[in-house]
Image (tube, rainbow, N blue to C red):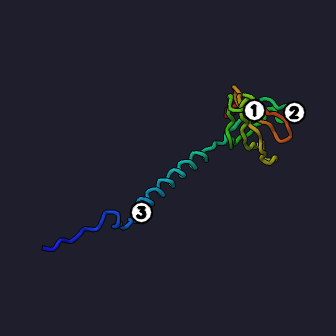
Amino acid sequence: MTHWRLPEKGTTQKPKKKPSGFFAAIGAGFLLALLYVASAQTEKVAIKEFTVQMDSGEFYDGEKVKLNVTREPVCGAESWTGQGIKGEGILEIHKGVEPMPVIVEPCMTAGHSVTLPDGRVLHLTDSKG
């Protein structure tokens, strides 16, 4: 009877399997779903109507305005000075004035305060209709 010798373990190599496209498709789909949810949450910016309670230049007192906050202010010790991080927004005053970018001040207890590009400050309260 003839005995055949088996090859040594180190000399045989198994063929490498290529990664399946199924798992790559699942990963790509999951990533797209996460991006969709993240973009949907960042686009939820509501335009709110306010009344100017006080204008430091006494020009827009009592005017109805619309404020679109594009970056919310953060109140707290997030900055080195502990005074909060300012937000950003777009303010629409009335039809004769172009919408302007404003700085939304943090740490306000009632309403919003915004700083106009010319340096004036408007204190806003919720509009009652």
Per the model, the C-alpha gap separating discs 1 and 3 is 56 Å
Please, is residue 99 above or below residue 80 in the view? below
Q: Mark 2 vs mark 3: which is more N-terminal?
A: 3
Identify the disc placed on residue 113. Answer: 1
Which is in the foreground here, disc 1 or disc 2?
A: 1
Q: Within the image, what quadrant is residue 47 found in?
A: top right
Which is in the foreground here, disc 1 or disc 3?
A: 3
Image quarter hosting the C terminus: top right
Image quarter hosting the N terminus: bottom left
Mark 3: amino acid: Pro
Q: Residue furthest top?
A: 109
- Give the side of residue 28 with respect to residue 17, left or right: right
Taking depth in this image into account, of 79 and 56 the one nearest to the observer is 79
Per the model, the C-alpha gap separating discs 2 and 3 is 67 Å
User: Label 3, on which residue?
Assistant: 19
Q: Residue furthest bottom?
A: 2
User: Label 2, on which residue?
Assistant: 57
Per the model, the C-alpha gap separating discs 1 and 2 is 14 Å
Q: Residues within 10 Å of mark 1 (few under 14, many from 20)?
A: many
Q: Secondary structure at mark 3?
A: loop
Determine the residue positioned at 77% across, 44% down.
101
Determine the residue positioned at 69% across, 35% down.
73
Determine the residue positioned at 75% across, 42% down.
91
